[in-house]
Amino acid sequence: MTPSTPHPTPHPTPHPTPRSTTHAVLIPSYNTGRQVYATVAAALAQWNPVWVVVDGSTDGTAEGLRQLAAEQPALHLLVLGANCGKGAAVWQGLRAMHDAGLSHALAMDADGQHPADLIPAFMQASQREPGAMVLGRPVFDASAPLLRVHGRRISNWWTNLETLGAGIDDSLFGFRVYPVGPLLAVMAHQPWMRRFDFDTEAVVRLAWRGVRPLNLAAPVKYLTAEEGGVSHFRYGRDNLLLTWMHLRLMLGFMARLPALIWRRLRRQPPFQRG
């Protein structure tokens, strides 16, 4: 039996956010409970349009989000029949957004960790340099688990090596703006990037294609269970996934090393297939 997760009644915005025809917020969600409604409401208060991909959730939030989408023209909803993983959910959202004529997607998590109030600043940075990817550089507070904070330093070290110092400050923080076309081209040629490995592999392969990173600081907050926080990260399973990801990225890096060195010397990023 599917549990019921009621959604809060949306309040009309006195000054609706103007609709962007190029940039949209993209929120993948899997069993985040009531927190997804707060995240979606916060995103809608900052930007129009907002797309949500429900990745096979069994917590009743798909029904609540359908009701919300019927009441909010700025909200677009995709519901996947089974859980496929974060990367797969983002991929489905990107394809739908591309078909709708959108060129850029600001990805953010549904669990309340990411700062919705910074959506306009990240979008404006992307609009100024549409060829770049705008990456969040996380600023942690006391709520951050130390094991995860230290662990991401290892991933960031490998990312810096795999891109020959392209300038990616953080490879795991999912609050970022992607150019939709290049990212779809990368994912079309990869059977991977469909689960927790998505965030890191996306920025590495985009950097290989010559997409320049722009890094902006963004606070991150880990909510407690009492606050509605939900984490699907599993240290054993997901660290094995990241290890395999970095292994294949290193193989790709070695194959591209001459071109990366040549680009570094010329300071001209040539287009490469992901």
Image (cartoon, rainbow, N blue to C red):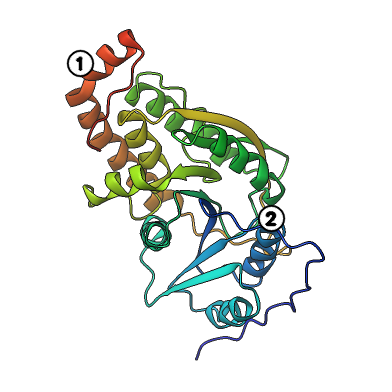
Q: Residues within 10 Å of mark 1 (few under 14, many from 20)?
A: few
Give the residue at the far top of this rendering: 265
Looking at the image, is 223 positioned above or below residue 40?
A: above
In this view, which residue lies farthest toward the bottom? 1
Q: Is residue 167 visible?
A: yes
Location of the C terminus by quadrant is: top left
In this rendering, the label closer to the viewer, 1 or 2: 1
Q: Residue type at mark 1?
A: Pro
Q: Nearer the viewer, residue 190 or 243?
A: 190
Residue depicted at x 43% and y 28%? 212
Category of crowding for the residue at label 2, using alpha-carbon neighbours closer than 10 angstroms: few (below 14), some (14–19), many (at least 20): some
Distance of mark 1 from mark 2, alpha carbons? 44 Å
Name which of mark 1 and mark 2 comes first in the sequence. 2
The quarter of the picture where residue 207 lies is top left
Pick the residue in front: 10 or 28.
10
Q: Which residue is mark 2?
A: 223
Does residue 249 lie above or below 26 as drawn?
Answer: above
Q: Which amino acid type is shown beneath numbered disc 2?
A: Leu
- For label 1, the residue is 258
Badge 1 marks a residue whose secondary structure is: helix
Direction from residue 22 to residue 85 in the image, left or right: left
